[in-house]
Image (tube, rainbow, N blue to C red):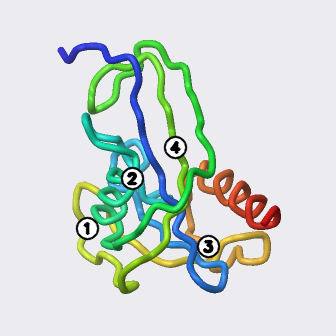
């Protein structure tokens, strides 16, 4: 059995593109398989937040990005929660914004990280272009992103 760890730290990256479009991935993990979400995952031991964002986006979507800010931090208490990386008492989820720095060439081969990736227009007026099944956290993050844009 794996040792209990205090805090699992995870990161998600919202990657805004022109025309109110966003890069999304179709999840491969059993718990959320076939749901569309922003790229993200566990911050590895000894890894900084920026490096985790760059790594996760490349692994899941095949894109190169530069982290530009933290949009929100969610804290979940979940004593004894079992994840593939161990048992945790709480989870910190950093929702970040990242800028595309390379070409918009998405990963096309399914693997353990993601089934596929794509670019979607999301928002109140874009339901037909949105992915069919998506993680509810995606909508919350995008609402925060729109609020952040309107404050600028």
Badge 3 element: loop
Mark 3–mark 1 Cα distance, whole angstroms, equals 20 Å
Mark 3–mark 4 Cα distance, whole angstroms, equals 23 Å
The residue under the point 32% across, 17% down is 5
**Circle 4 or circle 2, nearest the eye:** 2
What mark, if any, has residue 130 been given in the picture?
3
The residue under the point 36% across, 86% down is 103
Relative to 150, is 12 above or below? above
Give the residue number, with chain letter if any, for mark 1: 110
Tell whether label 2 touches label 3 (CB within 8 Å).
no
Give the residue number, with chain letter if any, for mark 4: 94
Q: Quadrant of residue 57?
A: bottom left
Q: Is residue 1 left or right of residue 26?
A: left
The residue under the point 34% across, 45% down is 30
Tell whether label 1 touches label 3 (CB within 8 Å).
no
Label 3 Cα crowd, 10 Å radius (few <14 / some 14-19 / many 20+): some
**Circle 3 or circle 2, nearest the eye:** 2
Q: Residue furthest left?
A: 1
- Residue 87 % position (x, y): 33, 19
Mark 3–mark 2 Cα distance, whole angstroms, equals 28 Å
């Amino acid at each position: 059995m794996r040792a209990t760890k205090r805090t699992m730290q995870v990161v998600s990256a919202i990657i805004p593109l022109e025309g109110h479009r966003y890069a999304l991935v179709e999840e491969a993990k059993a718990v959320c398989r076939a749901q569309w979400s922003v790229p993200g995952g566990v911050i590895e031991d000894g890894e900084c937040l920026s490096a985790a964002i760059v790594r996760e986006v490349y692994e899941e979507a095949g894109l190169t990005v530069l982290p530009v800010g933290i949009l929100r931090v969610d804290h979940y208490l979940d004593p004894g929660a079992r994840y593939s990386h161990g048992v945790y008492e709480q989870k910190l989820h950093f929702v970040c914004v990242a800028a595309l720095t390379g070409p918009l060439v998405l990963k096309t081969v399914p693997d353990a990280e993601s089934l596929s990736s794509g670019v979607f227009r999301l928002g109140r007026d874009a339901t037909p272009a949105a992915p069919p099944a998506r993680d509810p956290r995606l909508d919350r993050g995008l609402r925060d992103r729109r609020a952040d844009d309107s404050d600028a």
